[in-house]
Image (cartoon, rainbow, N blue to C red):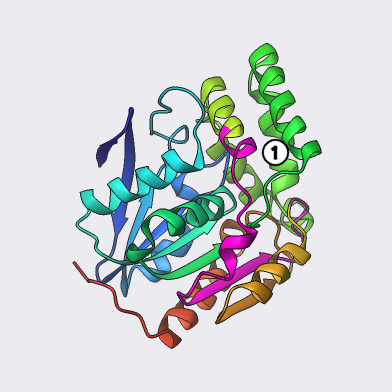
Amino acid sequence: MRFHSGDADLDYEILGSGAPIVLLHPFPAHRGIWLPVAERLSTRYRCILPDLRGHGHSQTGSGAATMQKHADDIEGLCRACDVERAVFAGSSIGGYILFEFWRRYRYRVSALVLCGTRAQADSAEGRAARLASIDDVRKRGPGTFLDTQAERLLGATTRRNRPDVAAAARAMMSSMTVEGIAAVQQGMAERADSLETLARIDAPTLIIAGEEDAVIPAADAQLMARQIPRSQLHMIPQAGHYLVFEKPVEAARLMGQFLDGAKLSVNSE
């Protein structure tokens, strides 16, 4: 299914029925990274999985894919799916988007799930590295960049013991174009710091982090847990940055327990 948002058409799919959960995938993958979790949750929930702009089958639009554009895209998705309120789960860039979405559309949010993400903006070094990667991808193509990302984003245990999972994750990245990578990297480099937002989040919040995440340290997840009222933090062993794909059984179990325990007010249609 597709909907139009701003200057781009975006793809999405829906699994199951019940109270809605919107699942935002990490860079540079697509919505398929959430499928193993969504298949488990879809027996009780309506799982809505978009391809973010610049990823998968969604268009990139013009200029940087900023967090503001992404947040407006998710608002448009809610309208397209007749969702008034939902649980929103975001992995990596999905979490960055949800901080901006909270600032703009908090009335939509009944609960948050933040996976392998952080509230801080890029450091000066991190921003410079993103911008340098754009130049490199434009000169050399996306292959080497995506190979490097696959190495960084998966935990060491997954890379060693689950070559099938590693290969599937790398295959998801193959849909990224040069312009998609450039737009999304530019948007992440420009994103606002969200540390001051944390204390204002009053929705039930689950934070999940992988113990082998080489991109975002556990300290960043712990910081969010300290600053967001009523939040819960769970670490998943033997999982890296792509924890929802590496350990979908554990991720779905944690999310299911969290949703069962939270007092949620969401529309089921």
Q: Quadrant of the C terminus?
A: bottom left
In the image, 251 versus 91, the foreground residue is 91
Figure check: 182 above or below 236: above
Q: Is residue 115 something that shows in the picture?
A: no
Q: Residue at x 52, y 69 (%)?
A: 200
What residue is drawn where x is 63% and y is 23%? 142
Residue 121 position in % (x across, y down):
67, 47
Which residue is nearer to you in this view: 40 or 231? 231
Q: Which residue is mark 1?
A: 149
Residue toward you, 194 or 47: 194
Query: Helix, strand, or loop for circle 1?
Result: helix
**Highlighted range, magenta:** 187-215
**Residue 55, percent from left and from top:** 47, 35
Q: Is residue 10 above or below residue 259?
A: above
Q: Which residue type does callout 1 highlight?
A: Gln
Q: Nearer the viewer, residue 251 or 221?
A: 221
Residue under the point 61% across and 36% down: 190
Inspect the magenta stretch and tell me whether residue 258 lies in it: no
Identify the residue at image location x=61%, y=61%.
196
How far from the left and from the top, in percent, is residue 16?
28, 65
- The part of the image, by quadrant, that contains residue 136 is top right
Q: Residue furthest top?
A: 139
User: Residue 226's image quarter?
Assistant: bottom right
The answer to whether 193 appears left or right of 65 in the picture is right
